[in-house]
Amino acid sequence: MEVFSIPRLDTEVGLIRAEGQWDPVTADIQLTELALMGTDGWMDVTFWMTEQEHESRIAAVIAAAKLYLV
C-alpha cells in the first residue's frame, strides 16, 4: 500500500481533500482523512467514513480518487 494525498479532488459531493493509502496493482483505496470545501474553507468530514448514511458520498470520493490516481 502506498500513501497518497490529493489536495483538491472534484467529486459529485463537492470539492474534497483526501488522504489515505492505495494499492496501485488492485486499485484498492483506504481513506484516512477527508475534508470538504465549504464557504469558510476546509471542513473535516472524516466522520463520513464511520456513518452509514454517508456511504454514497464515500463511494463517490473513492471513484473520483481512483480516476485521479490511475
Image (cartoon, helix red, strand yellow):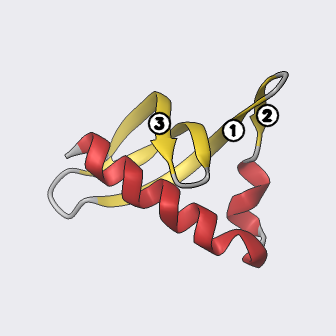
* Element class at badge 1: strand
Give how far across and how far down residue 17 sits, in percent. Answer: 57, 33
Question: Where is mark 3, residue-wise?
Answer: 9
Instruction: Tell me: 27 left or right of 8.
Output: left
The answer to the question of whether label 2 and label 1 lie on touching residues, with beta carbons closer than 8 A, is yes
Q: Give the x, y percent position of residue 70.
A: 19, 46
**Residue toward you, 24 or 42:** 42
User: Do the residues under discs 3 and 2 have CB atoms within 8 angstroms?
Assistant: no
Q: Residue 28 at x, y = what percent?
A: 32, 62
Q: Position of residue 35 (x, y in %)?
A: 68, 37
Above-or-below relation of 24 to 27: above
Label 2 neighbour load within 10 Å: few <14, some 14-19, many 20+: some
Q: Which mark is residue 36?
A: 1
Query: Residue flagged by tag 2: what amino acid is it?
Result: Met
Residue 24, placed above or below residue 17: below
The residue drawn where x is 44% and y is 58% is: 62
